[in-house]
Amino acid sequence: MSLFSRFGDWVREGQVWGSVLRHGVPRDRRTRAMAILSNVFLHLHPVAIRKSGIRLSFTWCMGGLTFFLFLIEVVTGVLLMFYYRPTVEYAYFDIQGLRAHVTLGLLREMHRWGAHAMVIAIWLHMLRVFLTGSYKPPREFNWTIGVILLVLTLLLSFTGYLLPWDQLAMWAITVGSNMARATPLIGHEGPLAQYVQIGGVPLVHAGDDARFGLLAGTFVGPNALLRFYVLHCIFIPLVVGVLIAVHFWRIRKDGGISGPL
Amino acid sequence: MIESMNSLLAGETLLASGGVETVKNAINWVCQPHWFFVLSCGVTGVFLGGYRALTRPAVALFALIAFTIAYGLSAMDADFLSIIIKPDNVPITLMIYLFGFFIWLGFRQAAVNDENTEQGRPLIEAGSDDKVLVWPDLVYIELIAMVLCTVFIIVWAVVLRAPLEQPADPSLAPNPAKAPWYFLGLQELLVYFDPWIAGVLLPGLIVVGLIAVPYLDKNPRGNGYYTFKERKFAISMFMIGFVILWLVLIVFGTFLRGPNWNFFGPYEYWDVHRPAALLNINLSEIFWVQWLNQGIPTEGRWGLPHFVYRELPGIVVLLGYFFVLPVMLRVTVFKRMGDQIGLIRYSLLIMLFLWMALIPIKMVLRWGWNFKYIVGITEWFLNF
């Protein structure tokens, strides 16, 4: 036996290894099952899985990639938060400085392209689930969760779009948020909003309608930047994280990856 | 290098004087909104009709090569190139290829499965008792997928810089001002609908409609495997709604909408000074002025405010569309389906269906007759 493998055995039989991984090397059926069961990250998988269910041509791996891209976004996003200040004075120049002065300033590129890739991946995931009829009973509710996750992914991307605070960002968000002005009843240019009034005093106007609530102002300004920053970095990711947990949990509870009944 | 580029350019100019410009003009012409839309509907229809023959690998490979050559040649045109190399438009190219590939992959397996079922052979996905251990069979696939995905994103990040334009300036609106690419389909709808429909109601209905899908689709077949034959209605609706009304409109908004949201062919220069669109007219104008040969009513009648009276023809049309048509469809084309899914499900389904159908209807009315509103009560911001 070579010195190398003897060293390996010594490590694997020691107390430290055994305390971290409570099973042996996954070589036989029992230890392979243990590898999945005793690991907090892996245990969202079942121990054994339908062979046709893991063929790439069946799943396209798009749900998994969407989740992995979300993780890339979280990691690069947290690193970006070290450098970025969400104020009109600094935002643009912080982004500019990222590429010029910061080691691994490439993170911003990864964050942006990862976000685009995530939007495409989640659409492809939806297409796959639809084409295989995987939303049918008993998975109806998990499809609902998936639709909400899809909307939240778009909102994450949309709120992040404003943060570089360049012309592209400001006007894309202006175009997007102008829609809210036209919300029925609660947008000041929306249908019938003028009849929402108390004693002849109109309640809905530019200074307090749906768009104002979204932007914290009547135009895309400093308040909107802060609001989108908080939504982008804290609020939506938290909700998405919880819903992802539910989504994965429900895959297991609803019978695993779909297949012919 | 530069010399070869020059000779290439010279060659192109030589060609340009002849056939190339004619081809480009023809493609520009075909890409006008109505032809582009009709063409995509036609392509989708032909694809769904002949999916078994059209998804054969040889045919798919030919389509891929043909499209890539066409796309590559188009990239030699300066105006087209300037659009596709915008950093935020790169995902669109990626999206076109990925969706082309995966739609093929899905329908290819559907074709094989449908063939198998007809001849009594098992499905591709058959053998559900055949189980493998997640370690190592699945975790290694996941690991490789994660590594490749990371490499892909890093290479993309190294090769292409994220866009950063001039600092934001509230007083300097760019022309055209475009929403992020994934919302361009909705922005395109703004041409045909009022903001409260295009920006609020339709997005809301898309979300509600998607959530409702599993509760409306009571067809028990096609659960967990690729098929088209057993779920023709559901899959066709999804292809129309998602591929045509969402993805195609995104492609349209990216490539073919220029300054002032005017239409520009893929090889046309985005001229800011091109005159804006024609004046559009409402149904009320057509009804009162063109058909009845009188002025638009300025006085109310039967206790109605004048603008409600003015828009009565449109209101009647809309009421018919949303309340009479569903009944007529229920007893004719949707009879069997209505019997199967019951009244409540049918009512929800038909509402979603009619709203979806309203999009192409209003598009065609706009392109063909410069039609603006069916009901245009601008006094209440209530325009359909």
Image (tube, coloured by chain):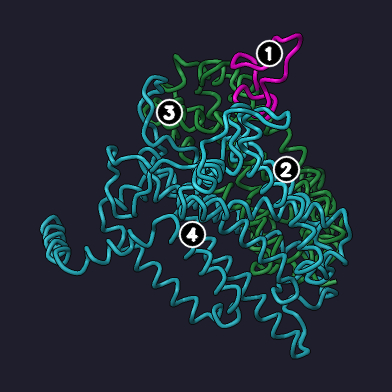
Q: Quadrant of the N terminus of chain A?
A: bottom right
Kindly identify which numbered label has been placed on residue A148.
2
Which amino acid is tagged 4? Phe
SS at badge 3: helix
Q: CA distance from mark 3 to mark 2?
A: 33 Å
Q: Name the residue: 67% across, 27% down.
A: B305
Q: Earlier in the sequence, mark 3 or mark 2?
A: 3
Q: Which residue is mark 3?
A: A98
Q: Do the CB atoms of the residues marked 3 and 4 lie less than 8 Å apart?
A: no
Q: Quadrant of the C terminus of chain A?
A: bottom right
| Chain ID of residue with mark 1 | A
Q: Which residue is mark 4?
A: B37
SS at badge 1: strand
Magenta stretch: dominant secondary structure: loop
Q: Name the residue: 81% across, 78% down.
A: B127
Query: Which chain did the renderer colour green?
Result: A
| Chain ID of residue with mark 3 | A
As for residue A192 lying within the magenta part, the answer is yes
Q: CA distance from mark 3 to mark 1?
A: 47 Å
Mark 4 neighbour density, 10 Å: few (under 14) some (14–19) many (20 or more): many
Which amino acid is tagged 1? Pro
Write down the region rendered in magenta.
Answer: A184-209
Kindly identify which numbered label has been placed on residue B119.
none
Q: Which residue is mark 1?
A: A202
Q: In front here: B151 or A86?
A: A86
Question: In the shown orientation, is residue A86 left or right of residue A5?
Answer: left
Query: Which chain did the renderer colour cyan?
Result: B
> Is label 3 on the same chain as label 1?
yes
| Chain ID of residue with mark 2 | A
